Image (cartoon, rainbow, N blue to C red):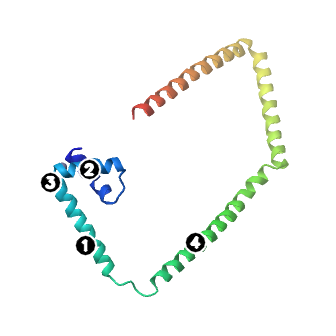
């Protein structure tokens, strides 16, 4: 282990967060490097001094009870908010559910029938005027579908490459 690695790990070592093997590695480095050993001792002393100074501050009477009470109040408030959110979402979604009822289906079907009738009469009218127009329209649609398929495939391919290279 080098000094750089040792310094990156020293905090975890002091907090007893390293595995046994990592502890052995870092301790082996302390034996051969006085600089890192001094750093470890200084940090250890600092931690100890901080702990002692925190412990010397008297805890105000009733603080523990106050903390527990405020945690319980917060829990109650959160669960109340969750209920209110659930009721609110239910109220918002109920008009959406109404839209899916039979009345909505009927309106949708009516629109579909009107659209289909308009489309059929348009096609009949156009084929009566010029059969070549219908043929060229068909060929044009096939070309558009093929081209758009290639464009979409290219877009998806480029997108995947961007994902990989970022
Ligand atoms: Zn070192």
| Residue 33 on image: x %, y % | 16, 50
The 10 Å Cα crowd at callout 4, few under 14, some 14 to 19, many 20 or more, is few
Residue at the spot of label 1: 49
| Residue 141 on image: x %, y % | 65, 19
Asked if residue 117 is positioned above or below residue 144 in the image, the reply reads below
Residue at the spot of label 3: 34
Mark-to-mark CA distance, 1 and 2? 23 Å
Closest to the camera, between mark 1 and mark 4, is 1
| Quadrant housing the N terminus | top left
Residue 52 horizontal side relative to residue 108, left or right: left
If you read the primary sequence from the N terminus, does the residue marked by circle 4 or circle 2 appear first? 2
Kindly check if marks 1 and 2 are in contact, taking CB atoms under 8 A apart as contact. Answer: no
Quarter residue 35 falls in: bottom left
| Quadrant housing the C terminus | top left
Residue at (40% x, 86% y) in the render? 60
Name the element at disc 2: helix
Residue at the spot of label 4: 75
| Residue 149 on image: x %, y % | 58, 22
């Amino acid at each position: 282990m080098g000094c750089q690695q040792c310094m990156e790990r020293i905090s975890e070592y002091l907090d007893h967060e390293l595995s046994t093997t990592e502890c052995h590695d870092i301790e082996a480095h302390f034996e051969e490097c006085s600089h890192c050993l001094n750093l470890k001792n200084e940090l250890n002393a600092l931690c100890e001094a901080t702990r002692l100074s925190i412990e010397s501050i008297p805890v105000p009477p009733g603080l523990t009870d106050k903390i527990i009470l405020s945690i319980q109040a917060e829990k109650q408030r959160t669960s109340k908010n969750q209920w209110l959110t659930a009721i609110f979402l239910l109220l918002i979604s109920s008009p959406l559910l109404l839209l899916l009822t039979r009345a909505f289906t009927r309106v949708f079907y009516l629109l579909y029938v009107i659209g289909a009738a308009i489309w059929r009469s348009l096609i009949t009218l156009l084929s009566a005027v010029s059969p070549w127009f219908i043929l060229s329209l068909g060929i044009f649609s096939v070309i558009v579908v093929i081209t758009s398929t290639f464009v979409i495939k290219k877009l998806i391919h480029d997108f995947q490459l961007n994902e990989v290279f970022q």
